[in-house]
Amino acid sequence: MRVAVLYSGGKDSNYALYWALKKGFEVKYLVSMVSESEESYMYHVPNIHLTELQAKAVGIPLVKGFTSGEKEKEVEDMKAVLEGLKIDGVVAGALASEYQKQRVDRVAKELGIESFAPAWHRDPVDYMREIISIFDVVIVGTAAYGLDQSWLGRRIDEKAFEELIKLNEKYKVHVAGEGGEFETFVRDAPFFRARIVFDEVEKKWDECSYSGVLEVKGAHLEPKG
Amino acid sequence: MRVAVLYSGGKDSNYALYWALKKGFEVKYLVSMVSESEESYMYHVPNIHLTELQAKAVGIPLVKGFTSGEKEKEVEDMKAVLEGLKIDGVVAGALASEYQKQRVDRVAKELGIESFAPAWHRDPVDYMREIISIFDVVIVGTAAYGLDQSWLGRRIDEKAFEELIKLNEKYKVHVAGEGGEFETFVRDAPFFRARIVFDEVEKKWDECSYSGVLEVKGAHLEPKG
């Protein structure tokens, strides 16, 4: 089974990739759809380029598609990108978003290929425990009451996860960040041939919206021991 | 004819793309092979990301393949990247490099697709006159006696080209930069839907090797009138 994995660099897309590789699928491409709205930050949000570093660490070519970012156009643009690939299936990191899953399923159906969403409807706590046991995953964006600046750049380890669970009980923060509460970035995984090291980061915090991002201004690959 | 265009962002790959589009080919992907040696500069040479901005301006998905940069491995890596694409041909910007043309031809033959090199063995002066008449092209790297710092970031217009011809007579600088005398970047072309504007650049000059690069630290797309 030759597949493309929809890839944004966070925990869910890395899980999708992990699953596909473990299953023995031939992962031909990582596919990132970059929307205009994001893209306009091209040189203001350096994180957008980190997917390249990840693709290099993994050793799989990255396909970057460009889309205006309007909802339905985005689906068509993704379809056009996948259409030109010799693949039998597409793997997505969808966890609970019906919208995301439905549109990938629809595109796959139209292209006559299979659609996989290995994390779909998994129990969030179980899922996160697996994630943190296999990935070096850090929080690079926050947008939820209870997640203050100190969470930006924090690695999600056992201790951080216990705190997330407590925040969930107190403020209803989704423990897997499904409602956009936090964004993650995977620096290392079993299938990375080299790990990503951040050289220079900057926390950007907006007190009004109580949200922030970790801008990674410099990063490099380091061989694994 | 569905094709991929080998794309680095300079005049030759943009010419290859221009030619393919004019010919009515369906250009499915731009393909950039990024070598390890270049890649280690990932966050030190921001220019490497400008191909993304160009791909966005053109509206064609970009495939980035990663290679160790060793000569023969690079060919195999390129083959692996092209192999997964539903294409009938590959278009390269090769101008005079036998090595470059031969390896693309060989890969195409092995994949059972066609290979095109529209600029191959064209007269350098004629070729450059066409280039500067259709592209907004600037010099982003220099490595030749006679090309001082003032050439970094300079647009190649008629006047600059006349000077290049004089330098060619005096110092044997190849007028199309074929010997690595200069590297170019295309900011606008007839097939760009938006033009690239440099926001912040820095000249890096090395007096010892008498060479330099223009680092583009910020850039954005601007709609065309």
Image: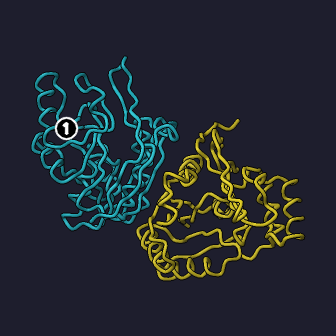
Chain colours: A yellow, B cyan
Instruction: State left or right for residue A141 relative to residue A72.
Output: right
Seen in the image, is B126 located left or right of residue B184? left
Q: What is the secondary structure assignment of the residue under circle 1?
A: loop
The residue at the point 24 percent across, 38 percent down is B98
Instruction: Quadrant for the C terminus of chain A, please.
Output: top right
| Residue B136 at x, y percent in the picture | 24, 50
Up the image or down, B166 lies above or below A93; here it is above
Vertical placement of residue B155 versus A50, above or below: above
Question: For residue B125, what is the image quadrant?
Answer: top left
Q: Residues within 10 Å of mark 1 (few under 14, many from 20)?
A: many
Residue receiving disc 1: B176
On the image, the x and y values in percent for residue B24 come to 21, 68
Q: Residue at x 85, y 70 (%)?
A: A171
Camera-side residue of B131 and B194: B194
Q: Nearer the viewer, residue B28 or A32?
A: A32
Counting labels gives 1
Q: Quadrant of the N terminus of chain A?
A: bottom right
Which residue appears farthest toward the front when viewing the image? A208
- Residue B84, given in percent of the width and then of the height, sits at 44, 60
In the image, is residue A39 above or below residue B135?
below
Left or right placement of residue A191 versus residue A52 in this view: right
Q: Position of residue A56 (x, y in %)?
A: 55, 47
Residue closer to the observer: A116 or A199: A199
Which of the chains bears the disc numbered 1?
B
Residue nearer the viewer, B20 or A111: B20
Kindly give the residue lying farthest to the top in the view shown: B208
Tell me: residue B206, above or below residue A123: above
**What's under tag 1, amino acid-wise?**
Ala
Q: Is residue B161 left or right of residue A21?
A: left
